[in-house]
Amino acid sequence: MPEQFAHISDPHLTHLHDVGVAQLLNKRLLGYLSWRRRRRHEHRPEVLEALSRDLAAHPPGQLVVTGDLTHIGLPQEFSQARSWLQQLGDARQVALVPGNHDACVKAPWQDTFELWADYLASDAPEPPLFPSLRVRGSIAFIGLSSACPTPPFMATGAVGKEQLQRLPHLLEATRDQGLFRVVFIHHSPLAGTEKWRKRLTDAPALQAIIESGGAELVLHGHGHRAHRRELETRQGMVPVVAVPSASAMGLHGADIAHYNRYAVSRTASGWTLDLECRGYDPAVDGFVTDDRQSLQLRRD
């Protein structure tokens, strides 16, 4: 039987109705103004409610969430997001990496990311936190954090030296175990695919590691757009797939909310990867399938 999982990103699920002025005396003020003017109309709770219903009706074996649960990374937003994550499922079923909005400014760990610790963690939690590793059947989920505080008007990310040093061994070890390796991260890992102020600053280094060590699938969000690119590695082609925001109404020409479901099957020459794209349809207030693809990934 195929093994199934799903990927969502950028839900921006929190509200900022009760934010105090003192909490905005930094870069967060810009994010708050953006939420007041635009984002609260684009990212809608009714879309997330429809998403939750759809996931509950067809539970994936593992749900991968690639960050930006918050708008400006306030402690109360982390608490709101924690409640939402608990509704999605047990932490063993929901694998999370943070996004740039979640790390808007430097904040105490115990007031923010500690609230999500069991969703960020590996199967066998031990420092350092990232890269994370969860193995579900024949699938290895490898999470990278690109979230870091940035100056005003910047939305860049960075994996950092320590994660880049540990990743090659992790890719090799999971390959030697014959696992289907899913690398997931908030920012695009491909150099030159994002605007300068939104890029992953060490994308060339990360891309080189994946080209050398291989993977079977790379997932990300951040751009609020759906697309599939390909990365050639020593072991064959790797799909690099992005999803739009999971809560977006698609205003002003933006992509409406979508998420992807995957089914993985082993073949004599590698793997079959089936992809189902499900998008929000306001007419039925629910998610419907609008595309299916099947990819053959040949591996030596």
Image (cartoon, grey):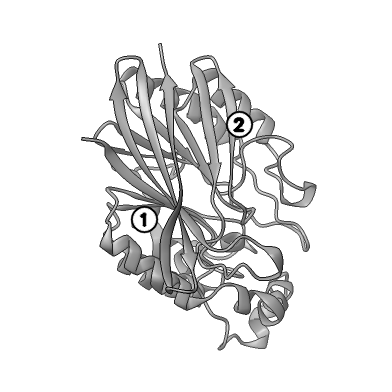
Q: Which mark is residue 241?
A: none
Question: In the rendered image, which quarter is residue 102 located in?
Answer: bottom right
Q: Nearer the viewer, residue 8 or 102?
A: 8
| Rendered location of residue 64, percent (x, y) | 40, 50
Mark 2 element type: helix
Q: With respect to residue 82, does 128 lie above or below?
A: above
Q: Nearer the viewer, residue 126 or 260?
A: 260
| Rendered location of residue 99, percent (x, y) | 56, 55
Question: In the rendered image, which quarter is residue 127 located in?
Answer: top left
| Earlier sequence position, callout 2 versus callout 1 | 1
- CA separation in Å, label 2 and label 1: 23 Å
Name the kind of residue labelled 1 in the image.
Answer: Tyr
Q: Nearer the viewer, residue 158 or 111?
A: 158
| Rendered location of residue 7, percent (x, y) | 43, 50
Res 258 seen here: yes
| Rendered location of residue 276, percent (x, y) | 41, 46
Q: Which mark is residue 119?
A: 1
Q: Is residue 145 left or right of residue 54?
A: right
- Which residue corresponds to the image point at 36% horizontal and 72% vertical from the top-left? 83
Mark 1 element type: helix
Q: Identify the residue under disc 2.
A: 206
Question: In the rendered image, which quarter is residue 193 located in?
Answer: top right
